[in-house]
Every structure is written in structure tokens, then in C-alpha cells.
Amino acid sequence: MQEDAGVAVAEPIVRSKTAKQPKEKEDQQRKKQPRYHVILWDDDDHTYDYVIRMLMELFSHEPEQAFLMAREVDTTGRVIVLTTTREHAELKRDQIHAYGKDDLLSRCQGSMYATIEAAPEE
């Protein structure tokens, strides 16, 4: 405060241009990351037990959910096992490729095949 002839005068408040915006505006301005599906493809070289075990270990799916996904990939040829960011989807796809062969089938040569694709925007 300044004193002007014995009277206290308040100085004007100057707001910085770098002051944070309210949280609502920050949230609206944040760009939502695009989402990607991790897709598991069917083949004849892996058992239901293998698929269920893999989905439980890599994706933490419950046994019932893993079974339903195993059945879907078997009947439709593919199943979406996860929808996430691109980086995470690439990691999970690579984990499927590195999971290894199905020891229950002697003809099995390696891991299952998975891809990622952009999920439709909501």
C-alpha cells in the first residue's frame, strides 16, 4: 500500500499471464490419446488351455473372461483382448508373440499371432 497525503491507497493487483487456468479448462484442453485394440488371431496350433493361461498371465483376465475370449477367437477367428494406448498395445502384442509355444500340442511351432489396430473414436 502507498500512502497519499496520509490516506492509504491500495495498489492495483496485477495478474500474471502465466497463472494456471482453472482445472476444468485444463481438462478440456488436454488431448485424449488415441486408443488401440490388441487383437489375437485364431490358429489350429494352440489349445484353449494355452490361450486361457496366456490371457490370465499377460492381461490379468479372470478365468471366465479368458475362456470367453478363447471361445470367441476359436469361433470368429479373432478377439480383442485389450484396448489401450498405442505404446501399451505394442508392448502387449509383443508379449503375445514372445509367450512361447503350446507344450500340449507337439505340432505347435511357437506363439500365437496378434496385431494392433486403431479403435474407433468415441
Image (tube, grey):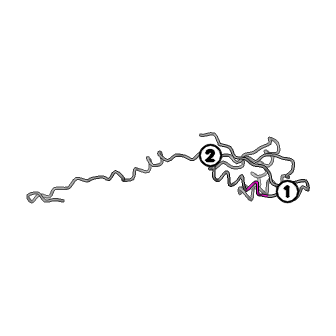
How many C-alpha atoms fall within 10 Å of the one at disc 2: few (<14), some, or many (≥20)? many
Against 77, residue 4 (above or below) is: below
Q: Position of residue 13 (x, y in %)?
A: 25, 53
Where disc 1 sits, the SS reads loop
Of the 4 image quadrants, the one containing the N terminus is bottom left
The x and y percentages for residue 101 are 83, 57
**Is residue 97 located in the magenta-colored stretch of the structure?**
yes
Comparing 49 with 32, the one in front is 32
**Which numbered circle lies on residue 88?**
none
The answer to whether residue 4 is left or right of residue 16 is: left
Q: Main secondary structure of the magenta part?
A: helix
- Looking at the picture, how far across and down is residue 15, in whole percent? 30, 52
Answer above or below: position of 7 versus 72.
Answer: below
Give me the residue at 62% from left, 46% from top: 35
Q: Is residue 62 left or right of residue 107?
A: left
**Mark 2: secondary structure:** loop
Check disc 2 and give the amino acid type: Arg
Q: Which residue is mark 2?
A: 35
**Which quadrant holds the C terminus?**
top right
Q: Position of residue 28 (x, y in %)?
A: 47, 45
Find the distance from the CA under tag 1 to the CA under tag 2.
Answer: 30 Å
Marks 1,2: beta carbons within 8 A: no
The residue depicted at 27 percent of the width and 53 percent of the height is 14
Q: State yes or no: residue 18 in magenta.
A: no
The part of the chain drawn in magenta is 95-99
Would you place residue 59 above or below residue 116 in this image? below
- According to the picture, the residue beneath numbered tag 1 turns out to be 102
Left or right of 76: which side holds 18? left
Name the residue: 63% across, 39% down.
120
Q: Counting residues from the N terminus, which is met first, the one under dot 1 or under dot 2?
A: 2
Amino acid type for the residue under numbered disc 1: Asp
- Neighbour tally class for label 1: few under 14, some 14-19, many 20 plus, Cα within 10 Å: many
